[in-house]
Image (cartoon, rainbow, N blue to C red):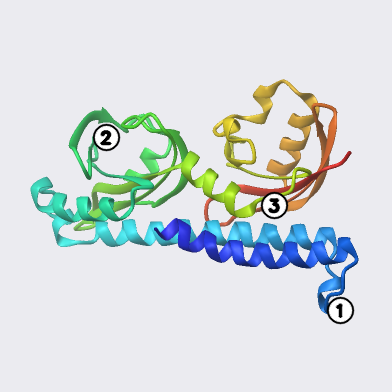
Amino acid sequence: MKTIRILLVFLLVTVALFGAYACKSAGTNAPASLMTVSKDDLKASILSSFVNSTDWFFLGLKKDMELLASTSAVISGDWEAMEPMLAAYQDLHPELFLFYALPDGSYSAAQGGPTGKNLSDRAYFPSLMAGNAVVGELVVSKATGQKAAVVAAPVMVDGRVAGAVGASVFLEQLNDQVTSLLNLPEDMLFFALDPDGLTALNTVSQRLLVNPADMHDPELARGKDYILKNKRGVVTYSLGNIPRRVMFVTSQVTGWHFAIGTKVQ
């Protein structure tokens, strides 16, 4: 799957960096170039790989949605004509829920057809129907009930929007892959927040789609507010009386704020 291929690249970078830092920490013999890696250098490199890999995945998925939306079968608006192609794409990407939506918000699943549900009340839908692609919008899927990030592209016919092709990326699966591939030590953590403060990715999977402000911890809320107000930087805050020092940067693709941090004992 595309997700796994991209994250494996990320893993190779991370393993190399952790190996360098481990050599330095243990005082073992290692090339001088590796011995200069500091913990902040490590976090910065992991953070860069984390953001770039995720952006690459979402940009690739956006291009796929745009390609599907530009095919003659989809442009025809005939479900029977487009269903085989959409179903074939869905077969190749079980980590996604692929759908085709009409301007009134009704939509069909690539496998299963009409859902009987409607997307017109989604916050992203008006922009999508205005001809803008959607990348990384967080939702609880109406069709599957799963936490997801939506990527969608409008279907254009004679200069007007005739519908949209989209995919919901299952966040729990994506988060599990990131967690497994990062394999961070217990004193480190990762997370990503969307522009509204909802959690897109997190070391603790139970926090997906949770806004830190709703956890009733003033220090955590302060840290969250600082991250949302700044494009990049470093912030220290506490959660459960344990200080955390977090390095963060904002993605230009999803608008998510990605962070790698350390629990300071």
Viewport quadrant of the N terminus: bottom left
The mark nearer the N terminus, 1 or 2, is: 1
Q: Quadrant of residue 242?
A: top right
Is residue 166 in view?
A: yes
* Frontmost residue, 180 versus 196: 180
Mark carried by residue 32: 1
Give the x, y percent position of residue 225.
73, 36
The mark nearer the N terminus, 3 or 1, is: 1
Circle 1 packing at 10 Å, graded few (<14), some (14-19), many (20+), is few
Give the x, y percent position of residue 240.
80, 26
Q: Residue at x 18, y 54 (%)?
A: 74
Mark carried by residue 89: none
What SS does tag 1 mark? helix
The Cα–Cα distance between marks 3 and 2, rounded to whole angstroms, is 34 Å
Give the x, y percent position of residue 228.
68, 42
Q: Is residue 49 left or right of residue 86?
A: right
Q: Residue at x 32, y 47 (%)?
A: 166
Circle 2 packing at 10 Å, graded few (<14), some (14-19), many (20+), is some
The Cα–Cα distance between marks 1 and 2, rounded to whole angstroms, is 59 Å
Amino acid type indicated by mark 2? Gly
Give the x, y percent position of residue 205.
58, 35
Q: Residue at x 28, y 30 (%)?
A: 118
Amino acid type indicated by mark 1? Ala
Using the image, determine if residue 171 lies above or below residue 72. above
The mark nearer the N terminus, 3 or 2, is: 2
Q: Quadrant of residue 123?
A: top left
Q: Which residue is mark 2?
A: 105
Q: Which residue is mark 3?
A: 231
Viewport quadrant of the C terminus: top right
